[in-house]
Amino acid sequence: MKTMIRAALLASACSLTAGMVHATSLQVTIENLSDTDGLYLTPFLNVFHDGTYAGFQEGSAASSQLEAIAEEGMVGAEIERINSLGINAQTAVATGPQGFGSQPGQPPVLDAGEVTTFVIDLDPSDNRYYSFLSMVIPSNDTFVGNGNPLAYELFDDQGNFTNISEILVDANDIWDGGTEENDGLGAAFSAAGGTATETVGGVVELSGIDFLFGQPTVAGFTVDGNAVGAALASISFEEVAPVPLPAALPLLLAGLGAMGLTSRRRSQRAKA
């Protein structure tokens, strides 16, 4: 009976320590690098995965979930898709600290010059790689993100944080979702009015942002090309100090060791 109890306690301790060893906390910081009258970004969808997640593929039609992000900045459907894939992934939505707030109930956007930060606990084996998606506004269907699931490695094959360099999202690295014409009409955050025109047979491709300059916004300014620098946004990662082991865990392990030693001594006396 005592053997069974020791085995159960040992299994629990091993499970607990394994979880503590593998969990790593990262602080993620996202900054909109545009100046005043520059471009805005919708809440960032951050995906920490095992290397098998891809939000889009260049040259292919956008999924309905990507279309929702590229046209409206809505990430809910993509999160549901990720959860249904059965892959090892964690998601986090980073919102602007103040933001414009386009509709009631929706999180604020990341205004020009704003910074947002969050901390997330990750498993280095299950959440080794990083991907992101965010709509650029005002626009019909442009967004930033990485289609290559292996582009950004957070942990190496030993589970160590890679100290990945800051990710700079270049203004020329903006993607066109291929779902609406880029005329500003009916576009999110645009004051141009009108009705959007669907693109027939469109595919995801690099677009640049020159066509966005001069567009009026519902925030009351016109997008100024001089306000958008060489990089639109930055994403950086910092490892957070590990959480101390629970106070009871060392006592549990010590107790297990003492039980084992006592058992061996009794066994030796019985044989003598």
Image (cartoon, grey):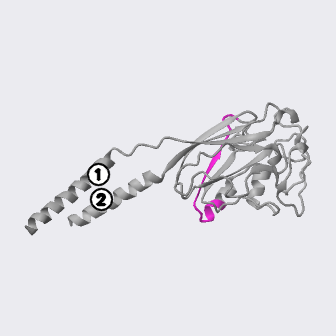
* Number of other residues with Cα within 10 Å of mark 2, as a class: few under 14, some 14 to 19, many 20 or more: some
How many marks overall?
Answer: 2
Q: Which residue is mark 2?
A: 9
| Nearer to me, 184 or 245 | 245
Location of residue 83 by image quarter: bottom right
Name the foreground residue: 159 vs 209: 159
Examine the structure image and report whether residue 27 is included in the region drawn in magenta.
no
Residue under label 1, please give it: 252
Of residues 112 and 235, the one nearer the viewer is: 235
Name which residue lies at 75% across and 36% down: 33
Q: Residue at x 67, y 58 (%)?
A: 150
Q: Position of residue 265 (x, y in %)?
A: 14, 60
Question: Would you call the spot at circle 1 few (<14 residues within 10 Å), some (14-19), or many (20 or more)?
Answer: some
* Residue furthest left as drawn: 272
Q: Amino acid at mark 1?
A: Leu
Specify whether 28 is left or right of 209.
left
Report the residue that reaches farthest toward the bottom. Answer: 271
Please tell me which residue is depicted at 81% across the width and 39% down the height of the picture. 230
Q: Secondary structure at mark 1?
A: helix
The answer to whether one can see residue 23 in this image is yes
The residue positioned 67% from the left and 35% from the top of the image is 115
Q: Is residue 171 left or right of residue 260?
A: right
Magenta range is: 81-98
Rendered location of residue 99, percent (x, y) = 71, 36
Residue 28 horizontal/vertical position (percent): 61, 42
Q: Secondary structure at mark 2?
A: helix
Residue 54, by quadrant, is: bottom right
Q: Are the residues tagged 1 and 2 within 8 Å (C-beta)?
A: yes
Is residue 20 shown left or right of residue 66? Answer: left
Q: Quadrant of the N terminus?
A: bottom left
Please state which amino acid type lies under the numbered disc 2.
Leu
